Amino acid sequence: MMARYDLAGALLGAVAIVGVSAAQSASADTIRIEMQGGYASNVGLLGPTELHLVEVVNAIAGGSIEMEFHEPNSFVPNLESLDAVGNGSLDAAWTSPGYWTGKDVAFAVVGAVPFGPSAGEYLAWMKFGGGRELWDELYGKYNVHSIPCGIIPPEGSGWFRNPIENLEDLQGLKMRFYGLGAKVMEKLGVSTQLIGGGEIFQALQLGTIDATEFSMPVMDLTYGFYQIAKHYYMPGWHQQSTMNDLLISMDIWNGMDDTQKAIMEHACEATQLWQFANGEALQGPALKELEGHGVEFHMWSPEILEAMRTAWLEVVEEEKANSEMFAKIWDSLSAFRADYERWGDMGYLK
Protein backbone atom coordinates (compact mmCIF):
# COMPACT_ATOMS: atom_id res chain seq x y z
CA MET A 1 0.00 0.00 0.00
CA MET A 2 1.28 3.48 -0.83
CA ALA A 3 2.16 5.75 2.06
CA ARG A 4 -0.42 8.50 2.11
CA TYR A 5 0.57 10.83 4.92
CA ASP A 6 4.19 11.81 4.31
CA LEU A 7 3.50 14.41 1.64
CA ALA A 8 0.43 15.78 3.34
CA GLY A 9 2.26 15.93 6.63
CA ALA A 10 5.11 17.91 5.14
CA LEU A 11 2.68 20.47 3.77
CA LEU A 12 0.20 20.54 6.59
CA GLY A 13 2.15 20.02 9.79
CA ALA A 14 1.49 23.54 10.98
CA VAL A 15 -2.16 23.37 9.98
CA ALA A 16 -2.55 20.07 11.81
CA ILE A 17 -0.98 21.34 15.02
CA VAL A 18 -2.82 24.66 15.09
CA GLY A 19 -6.03 23.36 13.57
CA VAL A 20 -6.44 20.34 15.82
CA SER A 21 -5.71 22.20 19.03
CA ALA A 22 -7.98 25.08 18.05
CA ALA A 23 -10.79 22.75 17.08
CA GLN A 24 -10.50 20.80 20.31
CA SER A 25 -10.23 23.84 22.55
CA ALA A 26 -13.23 25.45 20.89
CA SER A 27 -15.27 22.29 21.55
CA ALA A 28 -16.79 22.61 18.09
CA ASP A 29 -19.47 20.13 17.16
CA THR A 30 -18.18 17.26 15.07
CA ILE A 31 -19.11 17.70 11.43
CA ARG A 32 -19.91 14.40 9.72
CA ILE A 33 -19.61 14.30 5.95
CA GLU A 34 -20.78 11.43 3.77
CA MET A 35 -18.87 11.96 0.52
CA GLN A 36 -19.90 10.23 -2.68
CA GLY A 37 -17.00 9.56 -4.99
CA GLY A 38 -17.18 10.40 -8.64
CA TYR A 39 -15.02 7.42 -9.57
CA ALA A 40 -14.77 3.86 -8.31
CA SER A 41 -12.15 3.49 -5.60
CA ASN A 42 -10.20 0.97 -7.71
CA VAL A 43 -9.83 3.28 -10.74
CA GLY A 44 -6.19 4.20 -11.27
CA LEU A 45 -5.23 7.52 -9.62
CA LEU A 46 -8.75 8.97 -9.34
CA GLY A 47 -9.98 6.36 -6.88
CA PRO A 48 -6.89 6.54 -4.65
CA THR A 49 -7.10 10.34 -4.71
CA GLU A 50 -10.62 10.27 -3.27
CA LEU A 51 -9.50 7.91 -0.53
CA HIS A 52 -6.42 10.02 0.13
CA LEU A 53 -8.52 13.14 0.61
CA VAL A 54 -10.71 11.40 3.18
CA GLU A 55 -7.67 10.09 5.06
CA VAL A 56 -6.01 13.53 5.13
CA VAL A 57 -9.16 15.26 6.39
CA ASN A 58 -9.70 12.71 9.13
CA ALA A 59 -6.02 12.74 10.10
CA ILE A 60 -5.70 16.49 10.58
CA ALA A 61 -9.19 17.30 11.84
CA GLY A 62 -8.61 15.78 15.27
CA GLY A 63 -12.17 14.52 15.44
CA SER A 64 -13.77 17.85 14.58
CA ILE A 65 -14.62 16.50 11.11
CA GLU A 66 -15.41 12.90 10.26
CA MET A 67 -15.52 12.19 6.54
CA GLU A 68 -16.50 8.86 4.98
CA PHE A 69 -16.07 7.80 1.36
CA HIS A 70 -18.87 6.09 -0.57
CA GLU A 71 -18.59 4.56 -4.02
CA PRO A 72 -20.11 6.33 -7.04
CA ASN A 73 -23.89 6.27 -7.33
CA SER A 74 -24.28 5.16 -3.71
CA PHE A 75 -26.78 7.92 -2.95
CA VAL A 76 -27.57 9.56 -6.29
CA PRO A 77 -26.50 9.01 -9.91
CA ASN A 78 -23.11 10.65 -10.38
CA LEU A 79 -24.34 13.13 -12.96
CA GLU A 80 -26.92 14.39 -10.45
CA SER A 81 -24.47 15.03 -7.63
CA LEU A 82 -24.22 18.80 -8.17
CA ASP A 83 -27.99 19.16 -7.80
CA ALA A 84 -28.05 16.78 -4.84
CA VAL A 85 -25.33 18.68 -2.98
CA GLY A 86 -27.05 21.93 -3.88
CA ASN A 87 -30.40 20.87 -2.41
CA GLY A 88 -28.79 19.28 0.64
CA SER A 89 -29.79 15.69 -0.07
CA LEU A 90 -26.09 14.79 -0.49
CA ASP A 91 -23.43 16.05 1.93
CA ALA A 92 -20.52 16.14 -0.47
CA ALA A 93 -19.14 14.74 -3.71
CA TRP A 94 -15.68 14.57 -5.25
CA THR A 95 -16.00 15.08 -8.97
CA SER A 96 -14.95 17.13 -12.02
CA PRO A 97 -16.32 20.52 -13.13
CA GLY A 98 -16.68 19.46 -16.75
CA TYR A 99 -19.60 17.21 -15.87
CA TRP A 100 -21.74 20.31 -15.32
CA THR A 101 -21.33 21.96 -18.71
CA GLY A 102 -24.95 21.08 -19.47
CA LYS A 103 -25.91 23.60 -16.79
CA ASP A 104 -23.40 26.26 -17.81
CA VAL A 105 -20.60 25.81 -20.31
CA ALA A 106 -18.49 28.03 -18.03
CA PHE A 107 -17.77 24.95 -15.91
CA ALA A 108 -15.51 23.73 -18.70
CA VAL A 109 -13.13 26.66 -18.29
CA VAL A 110 -12.47 25.83 -14.63
CA GLY A 111 -12.25 22.09 -15.33
CA ALA A 112 -10.29 21.54 -18.53
CA VAL A 113 -10.13 23.45 -21.80
CA PRO A 114 -8.84 22.35 -25.20
CA PHE A 115 -5.34 23.63 -25.94
CA GLY A 116 -5.35 24.87 -22.37
CA PRO A 117 -2.68 25.47 -19.75
CA SER A 118 -0.37 22.99 -18.12
CA ALA A 119 -1.07 22.08 -14.51
CA GLY A 120 1.39 24.63 -13.15
CA GLU A 121 -0.03 27.48 -15.20
CA TYR A 122 -3.60 26.44 -14.41
CA LEU A 123 -2.93 26.42 -10.67
CA ALA A 124 -1.16 29.77 -10.88
CA TRP A 125 -4.27 31.32 -12.44
CA MET A 126 -6.58 29.54 -10.02
CA LYS A 127 -4.71 30.58 -6.88
CA PHE A 128 -3.18 33.93 -7.81
CA GLY A 129 -4.77 35.10 -11.05
CA GLY A 130 -8.42 35.47 -10.08
CA GLY A 131 -9.54 31.97 -11.00
CA ARG A 132 -10.72 30.94 -7.54
CA GLU A 133 -12.91 34.00 -7.16
CA LEU A 134 -14.64 33.20 -10.44
CA TRP A 135 -14.88 29.53 -9.44
CA ASP A 136 -16.68 30.52 -6.24
CA GLU A 137 -19.01 32.84 -8.14
CA LEU A 138 -19.93 30.09 -10.60
CA TYR A 139 -20.57 27.36 -8.03
CA GLY A 140 -22.37 29.78 -5.74
CA LYS A 141 -25.19 29.96 -8.28
CA TYR A 142 -25.94 26.31 -7.46
CA ASN A 143 -25.92 26.65 -3.66
CA VAL A 144 -22.68 24.67 -3.40
CA HIS A 145 -19.33 25.39 -1.81
CA SER A 146 -16.75 23.88 -4.11
CA ILE A 147 -13.03 23.54 -3.42
CA PRO A 148 -10.43 22.80 -6.13
CA CYS A 149 -9.34 19.40 -4.88
CA GLY A 150 -7.18 17.69 -7.46
CA ILE A 151 -5.37 18.22 -10.73
CA ILE A 152 -4.02 15.72 -13.21
CA PRO A 153 -1.42 15.92 -15.99
CA PRO A 154 -2.31 15.58 -19.70
CA GLU A 155 -4.75 12.91 -20.77
CA GLY A 156 -4.62 10.58 -23.71
CA SER A 157 -6.56 11.86 -26.70
CA GLY A 158 -8.60 8.82 -27.53
CA TRP A 159 -8.97 5.11 -28.22
CA PHE A 160 -9.90 4.10 -31.76
CA ARG A 161 -10.57 0.75 -33.40
CA ASN A 162 -8.69 1.81 -36.52
CA PRO A 163 -5.92 4.33 -37.24
CA ILE A 164 -6.98 7.91 -37.98
CA GLU A 165 -4.90 8.93 -40.97
CA ASN A 166 -6.79 12.07 -41.95
CA LEU A 167 -9.83 14.18 -41.07
CA GLU A 168 -12.04 12.04 -43.29
CA ASP A 169 -11.43 9.07 -40.99
CA LEU A 170 -13.20 10.94 -38.20
CA GLN A 171 -16.37 11.49 -40.19
CA GLY A 172 -19.36 9.65 -38.75
CA LEU A 173 -17.58 8.14 -35.75
CA LYS A 174 -19.57 7.78 -32.53
CA MET A 175 -17.34 8.76 -29.62
CA ARG A 176 -17.54 9.31 -25.90
CA PHE A 177 -16.07 12.74 -25.20
CA TYR A 178 -15.88 15.03 -22.16
CA GLY A 179 -16.12 18.79 -21.91
CA LEU A 180 -15.73 21.30 -24.69
CA GLY A 181 -13.50 18.97 -26.64
CA ALA A 182 -16.73 17.24 -27.62
CA LYS A 183 -17.87 20.35 -29.49
CA VAL A 184 -14.56 20.44 -31.34
CA MET A 185 -14.96 16.82 -32.40
CA GLU A 186 -18.51 17.49 -33.54
CA LYS A 187 -17.24 20.23 -35.85
CA LEU A 188 -14.94 17.60 -37.36
CA GLY A 189 -17.84 15.25 -38.07
CA VAL A 190 -17.81 13.10 -34.93
CA SER A 191 -21.04 12.30 -33.07
CA THR A 192 -20.26 12.64 -29.35
CA GLN A 193 -21.93 11.72 -26.09
CA LEU A 194 -20.91 11.97 -22.43
CA ILE A 195 -20.86 8.59 -20.70
CA GLY A 196 -19.75 7.92 -17.13
CA GLY A 197 -16.39 6.18 -16.77
CA GLY A 198 -17.82 2.91 -15.49
CA GLU A 199 -20.15 2.60 -18.48
CA ILE A 200 -17.67 3.26 -21.29
CA PHE A 201 -16.32 -0.28 -21.72
CA GLN A 202 -19.80 -1.74 -22.19
CA ALA A 203 -20.67 1.00 -24.68
CA LEU A 204 -17.56 0.12 -26.69
CA GLN A 205 -18.28 -3.58 -26.40
CA LEU A 206 -21.88 -3.19 -27.59
CA GLY A 207 -20.93 -0.84 -30.41
CA THR A 208 -22.91 2.03 -28.92
CA ILE A 209 -19.75 4.05 -29.50
CA ASP A 210 -16.86 3.47 -31.90
CA ALA A 211 -14.20 5.29 -29.90
CA THR A 212 -13.63 6.99 -26.57
CA GLU A 213 -11.42 9.27 -24.58
CA PHE A 214 -11.40 9.13 -20.83
CA SER A 215 -8.25 10.07 -18.98
CA MET A 216 -4.55 9.38 -18.50
CA PRO A 217 -2.95 6.07 -19.50
CA VAL A 218 -3.06 4.63 -15.97
CA MET A 219 -6.79 5.24 -15.70
CA ASP A 220 -7.56 4.11 -19.22
CA LEU A 221 -5.61 0.94 -18.44
CA THR A 222 -7.86 0.29 -15.44
CA TYR A 223 -10.97 0.34 -17.61
CA GLY A 224 -9.51 -2.02 -20.22
CA PHE A 225 -10.35 -0.02 -23.34
CA TYR A 226 -7.36 -1.66 -25.06
CA GLN A 227 -9.31 -4.91 -25.22
CA ILE A 228 -11.57 -3.40 -27.88
CA ALA A 229 -9.76 -0.39 -29.35
CA LYS A 230 -6.01 -0.82 -29.88
CA HIS A 231 -5.08 2.58 -31.33
CA TYR A 232 -4.26 5.15 -28.64
CA TYR A 233 -3.74 8.76 -29.73
CA MET A 234 -1.66 11.53 -28.16
CA PRO A 235 -1.28 14.32 -27.16
CA GLY A 236 -4.36 15.13 -25.11
CA TRP A 237 -5.09 18.43 -26.81
CA HIS A 238 -8.50 18.57 -25.15
CA GLN A 239 -7.23 18.24 -21.57
CA GLN A 240 -3.64 19.28 -20.97
CA SER A 241 -4.57 19.43 -17.31
CA THR A 242 -7.84 18.74 -15.53
CA MET A 243 -9.17 19.98 -12.21
CA ASN A 244 -11.12 17.86 -9.76
CA ASP A 245 -13.23 19.38 -7.04
CA LEU A 246 -14.95 18.71 -3.75
CA LEU A 247 -18.59 19.79 -3.62
CA ILE A 248 -19.91 20.53 -0.12
CA SER A 249 -23.50 21.40 0.74
CA MET A 250 -23.91 24.96 1.96
CA ASP A 251 -25.70 23.74 5.09
CA ILE A 252 -22.62 21.74 6.09
CA TRP A 253 -20.16 24.44 5.03
CA ASN A 254 -22.01 27.17 6.91
CA GLY A 255 -22.13 24.92 9.96
CA MET A 256 -18.33 24.76 10.13
CA ASP A 257 -16.21 27.10 12.18
CA ASP A 258 -13.22 28.86 10.61
CA THR A 259 -10.78 26.15 11.67
CA GLN A 260 -12.88 23.39 10.14
CA LYS A 261 -13.18 25.35 6.91
CA ALA A 262 -9.40 25.86 6.85
CA ILE A 263 -8.88 22.13 7.36
CA MET A 264 -11.03 21.35 4.32
CA GLU A 265 -9.31 23.94 2.13
CA HIS A 266 -5.79 22.85 3.06
CA ALA A 267 -6.63 19.16 2.81
CA CYS A 268 -7.69 19.80 -0.77
CA GLU A 269 -4.49 21.73 -1.48
CA ALA A 270 -2.46 18.76 -0.23
CA THR A 271 -4.61 16.39 -2.27
CA GLN A 272 -3.98 18.42 -5.42
CA LEU A 273 -0.23 18.11 -5.03
CA TRP A 274 -0.45 14.42 -4.13
CA GLN A 275 -2.62 13.66 -7.14
CA PHE A 276 -0.47 15.59 -9.60
CA ALA A 277 2.83 14.07 -8.44
CA ASN A 278 1.35 10.58 -8.31
CA GLY A 279 -0.22 11.07 -11.73
CA GLU A 280 3.10 11.97 -13.30
CA ALA A 281 4.82 9.01 -11.66
CA LEU A 282 2.30 6.41 -12.84
CA GLN A 283 2.15 7.11 -16.57
CA GLY A 284 5.44 5.56 -17.68
CA PRO A 285 4.70 2.14 -16.18
CA ALA A 286 1.14 2.32 -17.54
CA LEU A 287 2.39 2.95 -21.08
CA LYS A 288 4.69 -0.07 -20.79
CA GLU A 289 1.82 -2.26 -19.65
CA LEU A 290 -0.44 -1.02 -22.44
CA GLU A 291 2.30 -1.76 -24.95
CA GLY A 292 2.43 -5.29 -23.59
CA HIS A 293 -1.28 -5.61 -24.38
CA GLY A 294 -0.62 -4.81 -28.03
CA VAL A 295 -1.66 -1.16 -27.95
CA GLU A 296 -0.35 0.98 -30.81
CA PHE A 297 0.54 4.56 -29.86
CA HIS A 298 -0.02 7.36 -32.34
CA MET A 299 0.68 11.10 -32.38
CA TRP A 300 -1.84 13.35 -34.07
CA SER A 301 -0.49 14.82 -37.29
CA PRO A 302 0.21 18.58 -37.33
CA GLU A 303 -2.57 18.99 -39.91
CA ILE A 304 -5.20 17.31 -37.73
CA LEU A 305 -4.08 19.20 -34.63
CA GLU A 306 -4.32 22.49 -36.51
CA ALA A 307 -7.84 21.61 -37.67
CA MET A 308 -8.75 20.87 -34.06
CA ARG A 309 -7.29 24.18 -32.89
CA THR A 310 -9.19 26.10 -35.57
CA ALA A 311 -12.43 24.36 -34.60
CA TRP A 312 -11.75 25.14 -30.95
CA LEU A 313 -11.43 28.88 -31.59
CA GLU A 314 -14.80 28.75 -33.35
CA VAL A 315 -16.30 27.00 -30.32
CA VAL A 316 -14.89 29.68 -28.00
CA GLU A 317 -16.61 32.49 -29.90
CA GLU A 318 -19.89 30.58 -29.98
CA GLU A 319 -19.81 29.83 -26.26
CA LYS A 320 -18.87 33.39 -25.32
CA ALA A 321 -22.08 34.47 -27.05
CA ASN A 322 -24.09 31.78 -25.24
CA SER A 323 -22.83 32.24 -21.67
CA GLU A 324 -21.92 35.48 -19.96
CA MET A 325 -20.12 33.50 -17.25
CA PHE A 326 -18.12 31.55 -19.84
CA ALA A 327 -17.00 34.81 -21.43
CA LYS A 328 -16.06 36.28 -18.06
CA ILE A 329 -13.99 33.28 -16.97
CA TRP A 330 -12.46 32.72 -20.41
CA ASP A 331 -11.34 36.34 -20.64
CA SER A 332 -9.73 36.09 -17.20
CA LEU A 333 -7.86 32.89 -18.06
CA SER A 334 -6.82 34.24 -21.46
CA ALA A 335 -5.45 37.47 -19.98
CA PHE A 336 -3.46 35.51 -17.42
CA ARG A 337 -2.08 33.19 -20.09
CA ALA A 338 -1.06 36.12 -22.27
CA ASP A 339 1.00 37.53 -19.39
CA TYR A 340 2.40 34.09 -18.58
CA GLU A 341 3.32 33.22 -22.17
CA ARG A 342 6.63 35.09 -22.24
CA TRP A 343 7.78 33.42 -19.04
CA GLY A 344 6.60 30.04 -20.29
CA ASP A 345 8.59 30.47 -23.50
CA MET A 346 11.74 31.83 -21.85
CA GLY A 347 11.90 29.90 -18.61
CA TYR A 348 11.51 26.29 -19.69
CA LEU A 349 13.53 24.01 -21.94
CA LYS A 350 11.67 23.00 -25.08
Image (tube, grey):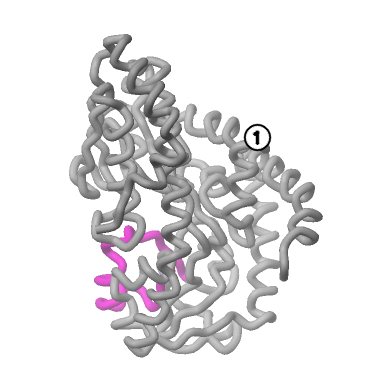
Q: Which residue is drawn at 44% across and 47% down?
A: 150
Name the residue nearer the viewer: 336 or 106.
336
38 drawn magenta = no
Q: Is residue 148 left or right of residue 311?
A: left
Q: Please rate how many residues cluster around mark 1, counting C-alpha atoms within 10 Å: few if below 14, some from 14 to 19, many from 20.
A: some
The magenta segment is 191-213
Q: Which residue is drawn at 54% across and 53% down?
A: 112
Name the residue nearer the viewer: 58 or 158.
58
The image position of residue 186, as x and y in percent, is 54, 67
Q: Residue at x 44, y 31 (%)?
A: 265
The image position of residue 23, as x and y in percent, is 33, 17
For residue 261, which quarter of the picture?
Answer: top left
Q: Which residue is drawn at 44% across and 88% down?
A: 296
The image position of residue 21, as x and y in percent, is 34, 18
Residue occupied by mark 1: 130
Q: Is residue 152 left or right of residue 308?
A: left
* Residue positioned most to the left: 74
Identify whether 269 is placed above or below 198: above
Identify whether 55 is placed above or below 261: below
- In the rendered structure, which amino acid carries the disc numbered 1? Gly
What element does badge 1 sit on? loop
